[in-house]
Every structure is written in structure tokens, then in C-alpha cells.
Amino acid sequence: MKRSAFTLVELLVVIAVVALLLAILFPAIIGARETSRRGHCIVRQRDLAIAMNTYAVANNGLPGYLNELGTTPVHSWAVSVFPMIGENKRYEVLMKTSPAPDEVAQAIVPLSALLCPSDNPQENRRLNYIVNCGPVAVSGVSGDIAPVFTLFRDRRAGPISVNKKVKIEDIPNGASNTILLSENVDAGIWHWTVQSNEVSDGNKELETEGQWTRDKGAVENLGFIWWKDQAFAPNAPASKPRPSSMHPGAVIVAYADGSAKPMNDDIDISVYLKAVCVDSAEAKSKWGW
């Protein structure tokens, strides 16, 4: 009886075909997964932007990147909007005068609403989204004008002209044209609590803009700044607080009107500045942008 079987050549051909199919399919699968993750990132930022809007309506303005909340010293912008994103229990614990250590430990566990799905979970980061903290002082220009263009300010006690609340409806460039928050791969932790000018990681380095002093460590972990010459400020004095992401070729950003979408990482600087500056006309008149 004659036997039928694969020859060595036929087997090698089959293996080659399977390998070719896998080589074709793998990039498509990986691309589909990244598309899904990017979609989830857009949704999470949109939810945060909507929460910011809800907070602004209830409190007559946006929170600061640092805020005096409850009976504890200072908390980040993220804690301010916890009640608006269904995190009331965390908020209540953090607002206690002397919460139990185990309560705090449970309250500050990583929160998916503040993390990009494309981030590496092994990095154990607790925050991927940061708010628009405005410009840094520009050479030859008095730093005390910087707060004029700052959306999220240091809301601790200070001069009212500096730490006053910013209303979304008062943004000169318009809410739909102004970036509220962005991704950042170097962000730190949302449970940022400071006592006076001391920050929780021991960084006491301060940045002075006129009469306005802010903790550089807090800005770098909670917000992004912008620079007149570079969209992503890789060489600016403080380079970490810039939009950046794990998404290939793009950074997801949310606008003050509650929308969110990708922004190409090769965006023209003039387009970028108009998107992050609260009042681009005023910036142009004062700084020549």
C-alpha cells in the first residue's frame, strides 16, 4: 500500500508560509492594540476635562495645580476633581484631619483614571496626565507677567493677582482652542501634599517669577510648562514638564471645552503656542510671539 506524506520540501514551504502570515499579522495586531489603548486614553482625558468643567462651575473657577483643601495642607489638582469622577471615598479620606495610615495607603493606590493605558505598568507610575501650568520666565521679560497666561496656578495662599481662580468662560482664546491637560511620561504622583514650600519628595528648589514663587518639583510632577521656541521644550530650563506620551507620533491632549484628541509631536510651534496659551494676542503684544 502506497503511503502519502509531506516531503521535507513541502514541510519547509508550509513553515515558510505560516511564518510569513505571522510576520504580516503581528504588526496589525500590535497596531490594533495601540489604537485601542489610544482610544481609552482619549476617553480618560475627556472624562478629566469634563470633571474640571464641573468643578469650575461648582467652585467659580478651575482648581490650581496645588490647592489648600480640607484640613490637610495642600493637595494636587487631581484630588480636587475626585468627587467629580466618582472617587468620593478617596477624597473623604484625604480630607480628614488625621487619617489612619492604612486608610491613606488604600486611598493612594494607583487609579486607572489618571493613567494612560499605553504606559508601562512595570514603571509603577501613579500619574500620566498633567495640567497646563503656563510659561516659564523668558529672558529679558519680567517673570511677574507669566501668571497672566497661566491656566493652572499655585492656589495656596499668595497675592490674589497670582493665585486667583481662572474661569473657563473667561479664557480669551476660547475653551475649545486651549489645552487643559496633556500626557507626560515623566509625571510623578497625584497624591502631592506639601507643607509650605516643602514638597513631599524633599525637593525644596523654588522657581521665582516676579513675586510669584512655586515649587519646581510640584510643577514637574503635576503640570506642564511651555516655551516660546520649542513645542515640547526638550532644552528649556525645566524640560520634564512638557507634553509627551507612549503613543507613536502623537500626544493625547484635552481641551478646556471637555474634548480630547491626538496632537502630532511634530506640531508647528506657532500652532502649539496658540493651543496652550490662554491669551495668545496678549502674549504676542508682550513677548512678540
Image (spheres, grey):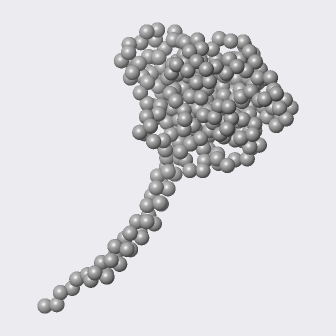
Considering only vertical position in the picture, is 275 above or below 190?
A: below
Q: Residue 195 in the image: x percent, y percent?
A: 55, 12
Residue 50 figure quarter: top right
Q: The N terminus appears in which quarter of the rendering? A: bottom left
Q: Is residue 227 left or right of residue 30?
A: right
Residue 123 figure quarter: top left
Q: Is residue 143 left or right of residue 102?
A: right
Identify the residue at horizontal 56%, vertical 15% (top origin).
198
Seen from the viewer's position, the closer of residues 45 and 240 is 240
Q: Is residue 132 left or right of residue 289?
A: left
Q: Residue 23 in the image: x percent, y percent?
A: 43, 65
Identify the residue at horizontal 58%, vertical 38% (top origin).
183
Considering only vertical position in the picture, is 45 above or below 162?
A: below
Identify the residue at horizontal 56%, vertical 50% (top origin).
248
Q: Is residue 174 left or right of residue 79?
A: right
Identify the residue at horizontal 45%, vertical 21% (top origin).
90
Find the residue positioned furthest to the bottom: 1
Considering only vertical position in the picture, is 41 above or below 90?
A: below
Residue 206 figure quarter: top right
Q: Residue 188 in the image: x percent, y percent?
A: 52, 30
Seen from the viewer's position, the closer of residues 31 and 227 is 227
In this rendering, does residue 45 appear at all? no
Q: Residue 29 in the image: x percent, y percent?
A: 45, 58
Seen from the viewer's position, the closer of residues 77 and 44 is 77
